[in-house]
Amino acid sequence: MIVPKLKRCAGFAGETLTIGLSLATGGHSLAGGEVHWEVEGQSGRIPVPAAPALSVADTSGLRLVLPALGPSRMMLLRLSAHVGGKVVAMNQVEIALYRHVDAKGLPSVSAPEALRP
């Protein structure tokens, strides 16, 4: 099982999200391999060290630069673990991407200090 570790599942356009990735071995030992990732045209591979059965293999994680352009949307990060040329686990994570809004020139709302909770 691929275990993504996110502090948050959302970010603004152009930001970098740091995502920890671990691989739980379950009842089988892991000879080492790679986690492949893909999201909106970006992709890569992260090495996974060998690990005994019933343990967790930690990786270096992933630093994902969120797209700088486009509308606010949900992005799908696809993950797959490969060992010996075979896919042994898959997972996916939805990440909310928010575009920056220029508020210059827009009206603002405020209340006198005495009325604020």
Image: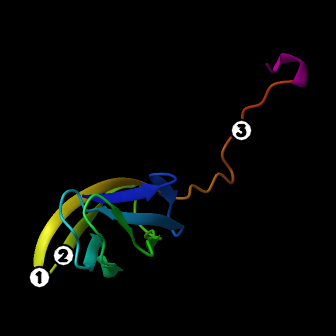
Query: Tag 3: Cα neighbours inside 10 Å, few (<14), some, or many (≥20)?
Result: few
Comparing labels 1 and 3, the label whose residue is closer to the camera = 1
What's the distance in space between the residues labelled 2 and 3, CA to CA? 52 Å
Quadrant in which residue 35 is drawn: bottom left
Counting from the top left corner in percent of width and height, residue 22 is at: 37, 64
Quadrant in which residue 41 is drawn: bottom left
- Dot 1 or dot 3, earlier in sequence: 1
Q: Which amino acid, mark 1?
A: Gly
Residue 117 visible in the displayed image: yes
Residue pointed to by mark 2: 82
SS class, disc 1? loop
Q: Quadrant of the C terminus?
A: top right
- Dot 2 or dot 3, earlier in sequence: 2
What's the distance in space between the residues labelled 1 and 3, CA to CA? 57 Å
Query: Tag 2: Cα neighbours inside 10 Å, few (<14), some, or many (≥20)?
Result: some
Residue 108: image tag: 3
SS class, disc 2? strand
In the image: residue 72, left or right of residue 79 = right
Residue 97 visible in the displayed image: no
Kindly check if marks 2 and 1 are in contact, taking CB atoms under 8 A apart as contact. Answer: yes
What's the distance in space between the residues labelled 2 and 1, CA to CA? 6 Å
Q: Residue at x 38, y 55 (%)?
A: 95
SS class, disc 3? loop
Counting from the top left corner in percent of width and height, residue 50 is at: 30, 77
115 falls in the magenta region: yes
| Position of 11 relative to 117 (above/below) | below
Q: Which amino acid, mark 2?
A: His
Span of residues in magenta? 113-117
In the image: residue 107, left or right of residue 89 = right
Please name whichever residue, 116 or 33, is drawn nearer the observer in this view of the structure.
Answer: 33
Residue pointed to by mark 1: 85
